[in-house]
Image: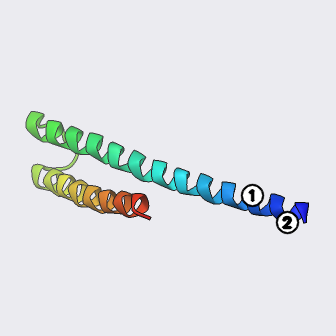
């Protein structure tokens, strides 16, 4: 009986640990995308985006903005579970 209780406790700890790690990874991704978007905007403002052209850099920025929205939604889902 004691082994079963220990396994249950270990499983609960593992589940909580996994949930915390998933949450941390989602928020880390959101943070990194915010930094990337900021860098993209700075690169566009300074013209520092070679070897791609301005239009391609705009696409990179828009893609990062879309991905940020997705990861913000994922983070919200994780927190609301």
Task: Report the residue that reaches farthest toward the top.
Answer: 46
First along the sequence among labels 2 and 1: 2
Residue under label 1, please give it: 9
Per the rendering, the mark at residue 4 is 2
Quarter occupied by the N terminus: bottom right
Q: Quadrant of residue 2?
A: bottom right
Q: Does 39 appear above or below 9?
A: above
Label 1 CA crowd tier, 10 Å (few <14, some 14–19, many 20+): few
Q: What percent of the width, then of the height, locates residue 49?
A: 19, 42
Expressed as whole percent of the image width and height from the top left, the position of residue 71 reads 34, 58
Secondary structure category for the residue under label 2: helix
In the rendered image, residue 81, in percent from the top left (x then y), is placed at: 44, 65
50 relative position to 19: left or right: left
What scheme was used to colour the molecule?
rainbow
Residue 67 in which image quadrant: bottom left
Q: Position of residue 10 (x, y in %)?
A: 75, 57
């Amino acid at each position: 009986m004691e082994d079963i209780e220990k396994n249950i406790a270990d499983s609960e700890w593992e589940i909580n640990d996994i949930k915390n790690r998933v949450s941390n990874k989602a928020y880390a991704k959101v943070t990194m995308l915010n930094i990337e978007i900021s860098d993209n905007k700075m690169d566009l403002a300074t013209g520092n985006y070679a070897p791609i052209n301005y239009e391609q850099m705009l696409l990179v920025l828009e893609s990062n903005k879309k991905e940020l929205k997705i990861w913000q939604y994922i983070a919200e889902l994780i927190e609301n579970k």
